[in-house]
Amino acid sequence: MADLNGKTLFITGASRGIGKAIALRAAADGANIVIAAKTTEPHPDLPGTIYTTAEAVEEAGGQSLACKVDIRFEEQIEEAVAEAVDTFGGIDICINNASAIYLAGTLDTPMKRYDLMQEVNTRGTFATSRACLPHLLEAENPHILTMSPPLNMEPRWFGQHVAYTISKYGMSMCVMGMAAEFKDAGVAVNALWPKTTIATAAVRNLLGGEAMVQASRQPAIVADAAYEILRQPSTDATGQFFIDEEVLREAGITDLTSYAVNPDNELQPDLFL
């Protein structure tokens, strides 16, 4: 499979966490990275900005374009896509990574939280994919990769946090629908989800603190799995719901110990699996 040298990736939520890890993995090949995220000023609880990620991308060997984008607003997405095309000549890969999370039952979920998750997760994925697609249709090996789970319709995944589940499954439904719609045009549209929790700011701040982080894997495992998917010919697989460790095992990477934050701890399975 070819590497990602010279490819242009439009990545939402790339200022930290999984989005940043994917950016750096692609940058190591010499890819062009469009960092589409909101954070422009350092935050005490959320390290990383679009500018610090841009510097890291350059240091890793890639070219960067930092764009302040709140994907709730389609005009901001469209402006960033236009700037990306002007800068790099096109878009080869769209990564829908940005996501909002609020794990609570129905009575404990304010409507503003419900709306935020719908606007960022489902609507943001649709809007970003839609804005990138005219350029993906002209690319040599176009991919859309969305960080969303398999459509597992077990009631337990709805009963605990129905609002969040609806929004994440909405992202996955975008994958299923767009994969069918653009299959004949040669655009691969797939999802990727981690087998275990990943050591991100969301896990530390919202899901269980440092104890959960110590039972998680590093974002690099998702980035390495994404790299394997994105190097495949776009006509080989579409409409798939990939799991990170399964992708790596298929690629011949069987020892995953190095990805664990603490190899001595039992890993925490992620949601929806």
Image (tube, grey):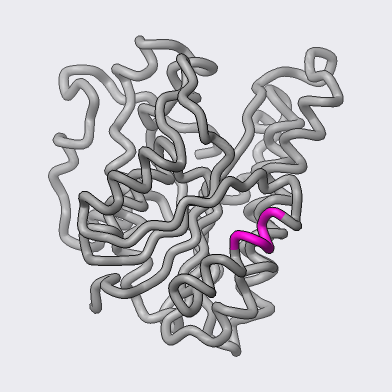
Residue 77 painted magenta:
yes
Q: Nearer the viewer, residue 8 or 251?
A: 8
From the viewer's perspective, is 219 left or right of 34? left
Q: Residue drawn 50% across and 77% down?
A: 90
**What is the magenta segment's predominant secondary structure?**
helix
- The quadrant in which the N terminus is found is bottom left
Residue 196 painted magenta:
no
Q: Nearer the viewer, residue 143 or 239?
A: 143
Q: Residue drawn 47% across and 16% down?
A: 45
Question: Quick check: can you spot residue 149?
Answer: no
Q: Residue drawn 22% across and 30% down?
A: 260
The x and y percentages for residue 123 are 75, 51
The x and y percentages for residue 5 are 26, 72
Q: Nearer the viewer, residue 270 or 63?
A: 63
Residue 144 in the image: above or below residue 122: below
Question: Quick check: can you spot residue 271?
Answer: yes
From the viewer's perspective, is 236 left or right of 130? left
Q: Which residues are magenta?
A: 76-80
Q: Residue drawn 66% across and 61% down?
A: 79
The x and y percentages for residue 85 are 53, 73
Residue 86 in the image: above or below residue 21: below
